[in-house]
Image (tube, rainbow, N blue to C red):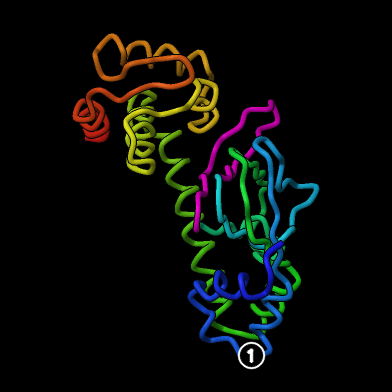
Amino acid sequence: MQDTKDYKSILAELPFWDKLSDAEAELLISGTKTISYKQGDSIHSPSNECIGVLLVRRGELRTYILSESGKEVTLFRLRECEICILSASCLLSNITFDVFIDAQKDTDVLLISSAVFAQLQSNNVYVENFALHLAADRFSDVMWAMEQILFMSFDARLAVFLLDETSKTGEDNLTLTHEQIARYIGSAREVVSRMLKYFESEGVVELHRGGLKIIDKPALLELTQAKNK
């Protein structure tokens, strides 16, 4: 388990750290712990809606909503050094919808207790501003996801997703199944498979077991631009 020195070096990266009093800094450190999740673990759901603020140290988290029919719509994903505040939704009084958070890979996080963060937020305007700014950023991600689903054709959505993935990973080879892609972009696996096969027939991607390789990025970019004119 990490000691307080390790926690301090990580927490000191938070933008409000130097605005904390010594007592507040000690409170933040004492209210932080390390948790490891296995791929597929459920981290947050309506039944445990306020576990705390998550700082991703390794791995990947996926935040999504679930329809009554069981359809999942991915809102955003978080990777190393990113922060999730929707796992502490009790700190955000205007959230009126249920979100789920799963570990997409084996993931290590620092968990800041919701009670500790709430105390800091109520007494320190810099912590409060940080929370509001982070929530605004995440809702911007949510609106982007909704805009794609509502107003963008499926081929353009898939092209945007593939380009985003290569940008984030720095790799043209993507280790993603058709089922995973379908969950990430809010579609059915069969629809994803058909469109990827079409992309392959056009020489845009190369499909292989367990993933795909981007062959023609300009073609994907042209597709996204054409669909948004």
- What kind of element bears circle 1? helix
- Measured as percent of width and height from the top left, residue 29 is found at 68, 75
In terms of depth relative to the viewer, which is nearer, 223 or 94? 223
Q: Is residue 120 above or below residue 42?
A: below
- The image shows residue 74 at horizontal and vertical percentages of 54, 38
Instruction: Name above or below for residue 22 compared with residue 217.
Output: below
Percent coordinates x, y for residue 219 in the rendering:
21, 25
Task: Find residue 163 and report its image quarter.
Answer: top left
Residue in the image at 42% along x and 40% along y: 147
Q: Quadrant of the C terminus?
A: top left
Residue 138: percent from left, percent from top: 50, 55
**Residue 72 inside the magenta-drawn segment:** yes
Q: Is residue 213 positioned above or below 75 on the image?
A: above
Left or right: 151, with 19 as reference point = left
The structure residue drawn at horizontal position 50% and vertical position 58%, both measured from the top left corner, is: 81
Question: If the image is split into quadrants, where does the N terminus sit?
Answer: bottom right
The residue indicated by pointer 1 is: 22
Instruction: Place residue 154 in its image quadrant.
Output: top left
User: Is 76 a magenta residue?
Assistant: yes
Residue farthest toward the right in the current orientation of the protein:
47
Residue range (magenta): 60-81
Q: Residues within 10 Å of mark 1 (few under 14, many from 20)?
A: few
> What residue is drawn where x is 65% and y is 37%?
39
